[in-house]
Image (tube, helix red, strand yellow):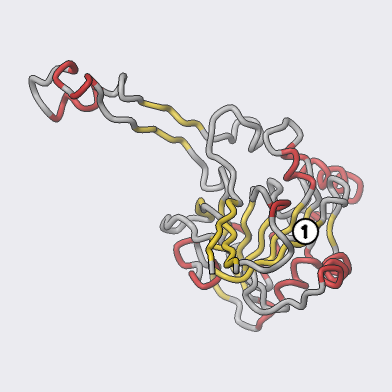
Amino acid sequence: MKRRFVDLSIFLENDVASDPPGLEPKIEYFTHENSFEQIAPFFPGLEQKDLPDGEGWAVEKVSLSTHNGTHLDAPYHFHSTMDAALGDKKESVAIHDVPLDWCFQPGVKLDFRHFADGYVVQAADVEAELKRIGHTLSPLEIVMVNTRAGSRYGEKDYVSSGCGMGYEATMYLLERGVRLTGTDAWSWDAPFVHTAKKYQETKDASLIWEGHKAGRDIGYCHIEKLHNLEAIPATGYTVSCFPHKIRGASAGWTRAVAIFEDA
């Protein structure tokens, strides 16, 4: 057997439309040539010319939200409590308490690229796609949705692109034992710009973040801003997406990958 990895993550980088304006990551780069002032205080009397080739170290200073880049949302992000529908309502777990076995499981990809931007996926859509790919869900499988947003990453319309997973569709997965999901869109839910229009028409606040809020009933995690989902099949691989360990946080960055065991 030969092991093969497919990267499902985006970069953390400057000047790319990966988040709404004002919420982007900011990375300051210090190179071998301009980092001497960081080194000098440790070694009194040192001059830059004394270093091999006059070079210091390379290091970066990063300003981030836990929701920049490809990241794993914890149940705590969605609501203060979880598992009400299981008869065991309790405080939602933060990212450092997410069970690690949720983060390394067989993957399933649902192809929803044909749905219009802002469409809210329903349980019947999930059921139809599972039938199309010939798959029956098993508990703890990691279910990822490939939306049109994946093809718009880095473009100005990325944040407003792609369909979203509604409450009904999310619960369909959770009721079958799924505890970790993912999307290549900016959000698991439909883009806010589309939901905002519906809210203005109906004043129904239950439409806001309805997929996320399913976590009130059954606690779960999801990965947002996946990438390259079109490069993998519907099934036949393991997904690894362990989050960075940030105490008490609502999310943690992850290097999500699909792992294939090829004959």
Residue most toward the left?
45
Disc 1 marks a residue whose amino acid type is Met
Residue 232 locus on image (x, y percent)? 69, 57
Residue found at x 67% / y 48%: 228
Residue 15 locus on image (x, y percent)? 59, 27
Q: In the image shown, does 176 or 255 lie closer to the viewer?
A: 255
- Few, some or many residues within 10 Å of mark 1 (<14, 14–19, 20+): many
When the figure is inspected, residue 133 is found, relative to residue 54, above or below; the finding is below
Please give the residue where the numbered disc 1 appears in the rendered image: 165
Q: Is 54 situated left or right of 200 in this image?
A: left
Q: In the image shown, does 107 or 85 lie closer to the viewer?
A: 107
**Image quarter of residue 209:** bottom right
Residue most toward the right?
201
Tag 1, which secondary structure? Answer: strand
**Image quarter of residue 223:** bottom right
Q: In the image shown, does 262 or 82 lie closer to the viewer?
A: 262
Q: Quadrant of the C terminus?
A: bottom right
**Image quarter of residue 109:** bottom right
Viewer can see residue 93:
yes
When the figure is inspected, residue 116 is found, relative to residue 109, above or below; the finding is above
Viewer can see residue 214:
no
Residue found at x 29% / y 24%: 35
